[in-house]
Amino acid sequence: MKNYNQIRKYSTSLFKTILEKKINFDDVKNQLNFILNNLNDDLKIILEHPAIEIDKKEELIKNIFKNKIIEELMNFIVLLSVKKKLNLLKDIVNFFDQITSEFLNIEKIVVKSAFELDIKQKEKLEKMFENILNKKTNVDYIIDKKLICGIMINIRDKILENSIKTRLTQFKNNIIINWQL
């Protein structure tokens, strides 16, 4: 990841501030996502423009996000704009999310399936993950029609897959290998 050290530095700094002030992590994550959704490229250019004074940038940020985000996040966005690091915000938010998940002992898992899983299937999977990992889990469910049928699970840097797509690919590779002999 490009700029990893800077991303880590800003994320860790934000995490320490939130921890010290005992602010709810979920609230902060929601507000960070709100900022990401509302901070478009044009606004980033304005906020990072060297001709605009810091006071004006701070005033603009406060006007846009007033009563929507906490003061610590306003100050954080001002800092990123002054340092011309708003382009790193998405990566900073992702890294912050990783740090808070580790701190709260929550494992992030992504489950991809060809079709929507019903509530019982999701509950069963989540309970199984929590029992195996001995942690709370935060599971994101994604529908991926390319799987044809089956499921793919991403836990940490591991991928567990049992799908027809994978089996067809393996079958095709076996035919090619055997045909060449």
Image (cartoon, rainbow, N blue to C red):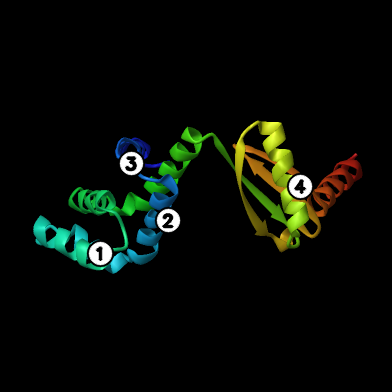
- The disc labelled 1 sits on which kind of residue? Lys
Sequence-first disc among 1 and 2? 2
Task: Identify the element where label 1 is drawn.
Answer: loop
Percent position of residue 108, x then y: 58, 43
Measured Cα–Cα span from mark 1 to mark 2: 15 Å
Percent position of residue 58, x then y: 16, 58
Q: Residue at x 55, y 38 (%)?
A: 106
Measured Cα–Cα span from mark 4 to mark 3: 33 Å
Determine which of the numbered discs, if any, sits on residue 121 in the image: none
Q: Are marks 3 and 2 in contact (CB under 8 Å)?
A: no
Q: Residue at x 34, y 40 (%)?
A: 22
Task: Identify the element where label 3 is drawn.
Answer: helix
Q: Are marks 1 and 3 in contact (CB under 8 Å)?
A: no
Q: Which residue is mark 3?
A: 18
Q: Which residue is mark 4?
A: 124
- The disc labelled 2 sits on which kind of residue? Asn
- Image quadrant holding the C terminus, namely top right
Sequence-first disc among 3 and 2? 3
Q: Which residue is mark 2?
A: 30
Seen from the viewer's position, the closer of residues 108 and 170 is 108
Task: Identify the element where label 2 is drawn.
Answer: helix
- The disc labelled 3 sits on which kind of residue? Ile
Measured Cα–Cα span from mark 1 to mark 4: 42 Å
Left or right: 21, with 134 as reference point: left
Crowd around label 4: few <14 · some 14–19 · many ≥20 (10 Å): few
Seen from the viewer's position, the closer of residues 85 and 73 is 73
Q: Are marks 1 and 2 in contact (CB under 8 Å)?
A: no
